[in-house]
Amino acid sequence: SSIEYLDWIEPHKQEPLTSYVKRISGPISDSDENILVGHSFGGVVSQEIFNIKTIKKVMLISSIRSRQELPSSFKISRILGAHRFLTKKLMLATFPFWAKEHGFSSEEEQQLFREMVSSYSNRYHKWAIRRLSEWESFYEIPSDRIVQIHGKKDLTFPIKIIQAPNYVLEEGDHFMLYHHAKKLSKIIQQELS
């Protein structure tokens, strides 16, 4: 077995999520051995890929299983069309005010976040926020084929609205992929075996 990384691709103008998912999942062969691991919005995309490809299991890290787990701030964003104003320039400008409470404590972590956001185009950034705020899960992945790992201190997707996570990391925040890599790796290995 091998590990492959899917890089984000540039969305077409006004591209629906279903179209984007078809394009990004192109390199994935149909195999009942495929396991997708998705963080945050990547978890939503992974669930959409599950719907069109042969996938054994989806693992969500700091992500949501359904629209019911989407915070009201995203739902309001959809109604107001706020994605149009949430540019990456604005995100980077306001980052110092919310960085620490969202888990980006050290200068190294903050620099990593800035580099990550800077690598996306403004179109991708606004598109992803819009698609996340609109996301409706019209099907349910069987519970034995999805694993949700969430942090108790996640402020992006607060634990209080996450309905039935399989694993909860007490000190985990939205950036726990970085902060708690060893614990996550152990859980993933456990699920793979």
Image (spheres, rainbow, N blue to C red):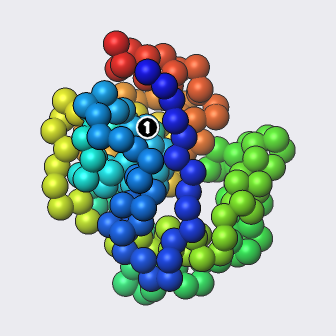
Q: Which quadrant is home to the N terminus?
A: top left
Of residues 5 and 87, the one nearer the viewer is: 5
Name the residue carrying label 1.
37
The residue lying at 23 percent from left, 52 percent from top is: 51
| Residue 144, image x, y percentages | 19, 30
In screen coordinates, is 127 left or right of 68?
right
Relative to 146, does residue 133 appear above or below in the rendering?
below
Residue projecting furthest to the right = 107
In screen coordinates, is 179 left or right of 54?
right
In screen coordinates, is 167 left or right of 9?
left
| Residue 16, image x, y percentages | 37, 74
The residue lying at 74 percent from left, 67 percent from top is: 92
Of residues 15 and 41, the one nearer the viewer is: 15
The residue lying at 33 percent from left, 38 percent from top is: 58
Relative to 94, does residue 103 appear above or below in the rendering?
above
Residue 54 figure quarter: top left
Relative to 142, does residue 157 appear above or below in the rendering?
below
Q: Give the amino acid type for the residue marked by disc 1 in the picture.
A: Val
